[in-house]
Image (cartoon, rainbow, N blue to C red):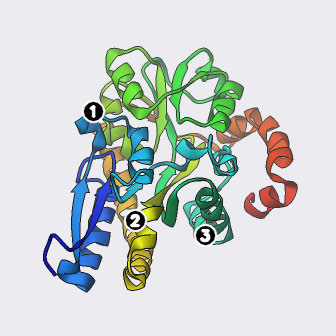
Amino acid sequence: MSKTNAIQIRMGGYGPASTCFSKALVFIGDRLKAEFGDQVDIKYVWNIMEFGYRSEDILWLVESGVLSLGYQSSSYLTDRVPELGFVDLPFLFSSKDQARGAMDGALGSTLAQKIEDRVGYRIVGWLENGFRHISNRVRPVRSPQDLAGMTIRVLPSDVQVRTFELLGAQPLRWDLTEALAAIVAGKIDAQENPLANTVTYGAHKYHPFHTLTGHFYISRPIFICRAQFDSWPKPLQEAMRRAATDAVVFQRALAIEEELEARRAIDAEGCTVEELTLDEHANFERAVSPMLVEAEKAYGVSMLRSIRR
């Protein structure tokens, strides 16, 4: 089959080619090329922000078919799929194993179906963005009181806004593009991200104070333009699903090493890293405890109890 007749599969993201997310895309592409050869034509756009897009634009770029496949933190879809707010709840998971099991199991399947019911995607897996921590330019943070009055960028999720309101900060629902510019300009006090993201986007060069709160665990669905996916031959659809499943395992392993490398980079920058005691961590959980009552009303008691320890 000639290149002109090959099925075009364009994969995109919003980070450098060196990240575990970009490498997961390559994993998928290599698997498909090995199986289908010149029947497919794979292309990559590592970072759409380098072309003037906002990070959130990956959503419509894939839904409209400009890109075939992308990833994005699930929080960006909560306005269209309110059920995704459940996995934005603070301190929902106590370990990576618990979180991964939930996202690979019934919870992940339910949320994938909710997305497909409302958005023009096929969901083929959940990449790990991981546990998120706080960095800031003002002072060390070891208690919710230390966050009082700080402006902090959060993902576009009402649940995350509510979380940081309860913690005493002033949350700003900003796209990553806005947040990065504000951090460099010193116009925002704090941000929250996995350590790897904090380093990838350079926030540690402007924020000397870091606290390992682990307040949210966020996943990034791998989503495919439904119109394109559904038009593919069945063997290609099935191969894509298998490749994505294996890419998730591959990416999560890389993410562990990325986190260790990020911690080394933060230390090398001369930043302070606060590791909370159990009692200090419990203070953060208590501060957001009203959200449990709200969550039971919003999502149901059984759903919450099936996840929480």
Q: Indicate the secondary structure of the residue bearing disc 3.
A: helix
Residue that numbered label 1 is attached to:
52
Towards the viewer: 204 or 125:
125
Residue drawn 59% across and 65% down? 103
Occupied quadrant, residue 42: bottom left
Q: Between disc 2 and disc 3, whose residue precedes?
A: 3
Q: Position of residue 241 (x, y in %)?
A: 44, 76
Residue 235 in the image: state x and y as whole percent. 39, 85
Residue 301, above or below 39: above
Which numbered marker is on residue 228?
A: 2
The circle drawn on residue 101 is 3
Distance between the Cα atoms at labels 3 and 1? Answer: 37 Å
Q: Amino acid at mark 2?
A: Gln
Q: Nearer the viewer, mark 2 or mark 1?
A: 2
Q: Amino acid at mark 1?
A: Gly
145 or 218, nearer to the observer: 218
Q: Residues within 10 Å of mark 3 (few under 14, many from 20)?
A: few
User: Quadrant where the N terminus lies?
Assistant: bottom left
Q: Earlier in the sequence, mark 2 or mark 1?
A: 1
Q: Give the camera-side residue of 158 and 239.
A: 239
Q: Position of residue 111 (x, y in %)?
A: 64, 60
Residue nearest the observer in this picture, 216 or 43: 43
Contact (Cβ within 8 Å) of mark 2 with mark 3 = no
